[in-house]
Amino acid sequence: MPYTKLLLIACSLLIFISGVDSQELNLIPNPKEVKKLIGTNYRLSPSSIIHYSHNTLNEALYLQNILNRSTGFNIAITKTIDQTTPGGIHLSLQSEEKSPKEAYTFNSGANSVTITASHPHGIFNGIQTLLQLMPVQVYANKSQKNVKWEIPAVIINDAPTFSWRGMHLDVARHFYSVDFVKRFIDILAYHKMNTFHWHLTEDQGWRIEIKKYPRLTEVGAWRDSTLIGHMRDKPHTFKVERTGGYYTQAEIKEVVQYAQERHITIVPEIEMPGHAQAAVAAYPEFGCTGMSPGVRPIWGISKDIFSPEEKTIEFLKDVLDEVMALFPGEYIHIGGDEAHKNQWEESERIQELMRERGLHDMHQMQSWFITQIDEYLRSKGRKLIGWDEILEGGLADGAAVMSWRGEKGAIKAARMGHKAVMAASKMTYFNRYQSRDRENEPLAHGHFLPLETVYHFNPVPDSLSSQEATYILGAQGQLWSEYIATADYMEYMALPRLCALSDVVWSNNSDRDYQVFLRALVTHLQRLDEMQINYRLPDELR
């Protein structure tokens, strides 16, 4: 989007958007408290220095890299014990036990900029605000000329509303490179998101190297053909071509470190007991028929499911051992959704198992299955999270729920005293169309999810009491990739709806205003242009 067109849009928006201090800064997400100061802006120059205190070297290097790349300066960094040193940019870590670790204070004036926090994560969030306060060219990938690198004189006190501010990425239906995954993590960091839900296994592909079970990637990571067009189109046609890929454990370690440097926790998802056809194709002894169905070439839900045998549980424990060794985060996502139980119902052996275990139906069998995994994860100091179907048959103790079928799963979980993340499909599934005019949009899963709907999403159901509401960790957006085959299209589907969601999970619900957001978005899209990130221009700005 050319700057001239965006400027015209900005002028038109001024007609119906009133201006106040925080709005004029065009920050996304919008900070909690902003005060503009009367005084001279801070001017970045080649002699500017980044002063960092203990444990903030990572953040100083991150900022230095971005500033030097775009400004062409050679800005130095130095460890400074005395934060009263005049001039430059100060990253000041101060011990305040009551201060949330992601909170920060930003103070800029003519002589210096200071970001103060009790934790490096707060410093990092303040850096994202600093970058957004600068000219949009700061996000460019090469040195920019004739730019006044100024930062307005402001005081900002800021902290997130929710602790879980996430995005999901399905790399199983279509595989994405390590470089793109890193780029996606950067996009989350720019928006102060802190959780990356990495959907690594599916019916259509297994994407993580498990050394004890090499066939999971030798067989499960590849399919011989892929559906062309939409599932609704009949008859189905296929592109007959071997396609797929997987991440080696070395690559995953690289991505995890990259995310950690940006204060983003990766939550890996290993689907069970359903959505398991790729795994069963590789190791049919852990399925219900003993036969390999092959890796699924079509979308939708496979009938092939893990068997609830003890040997399958042991297999999955082995898999999870290697997963936990790669991902240090608190939660491991085990899916649990859309587990078709036909093969369980039709198996005399599994019917016998049900009776032996004193279970009444296959919903309880799934609960037994999830409980085995939950207990194992807890024995390793981890926590289980799954889609809201894990509530069926009884929720495993200590498990958290990701509520995708509306609010009911989160409400039920919260009232049972379990943590929940809001992922309601009608509000957070970014694989849906962004316009009612589908003829002029790329192929998508279906339905219509406009930017404004995402912006008005409230992660806390109104029916919850104030105490029950404390169990809502936050929310995340979902990017299912059945119809999203390229990185460029993935960005198009994510943005700017991801921008709106970042405001939902960061800012106070009562303070948010869609028209204010649109005004900020005009400038924010220029930032995305500088980063060469693709996006869909929302209808309101056309």
Image (cartoon, grey):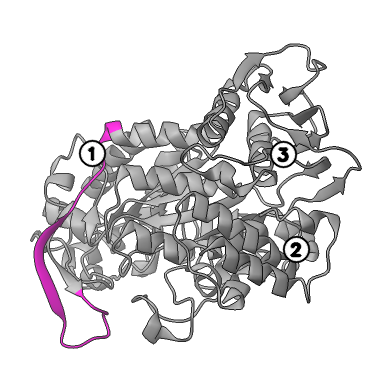
Q: Mark 1 = which residue?
A: 210
Q: What residue is at 25 percent from the left and 59 percent from the top?
A: 276
Q: CA distance from mark 1 to mark 2?
A: 43 Å
Magenta highlight range: 228-250
Say if the magenta span includes residue 245. Answer: yes
Amino acid residing under circle 1: Ile
Q: Are marks 3 and 1 in contact (CB under 8 Å)?
A: no
Query: Residue at position x 27%, y 85% from top?
Result: 232
Q: Residue at x 83, y 69 (%)?
A: 18
Check disc 3 and give the amino acid type.
Glu
Q: Earlier in the sequence, mark 3 or mark 1?
A: 3
Answer left or right for 205 relative to 423.
left
Q: Amino acid at mark 2?
A: Asn
Callout 1 environment at 10 Å: few (<14), some (14 to 19), or many (20+)? many
Based on the displayed image, in which of its 4 quarters is residue 418 positioned? bottom right
Residue 400 in view here: no
Q: Position of residue 435 (x, y in %)?
A: 48, 81
In the image, residue 161 above or below residue 355: above
Q: Which residue of the protein is positioned furthest toward the right in this rendering?
A: 38
Quick check: can you spot residue 275?
Answer: yes
Which mark, residue 509?
2
In this rendered view, identify the residue nearer to me: 160 or 464.
160
Q: Earlier in the sequence, mark 1 or mark 2?
A: 1
Q: Kindly state the secondary structure of the residue where label 1 is placed.
A: loop
Q: Nearer the viewer, mark 1 or mark 2?
A: 2
Residue ID for mark 3:
150
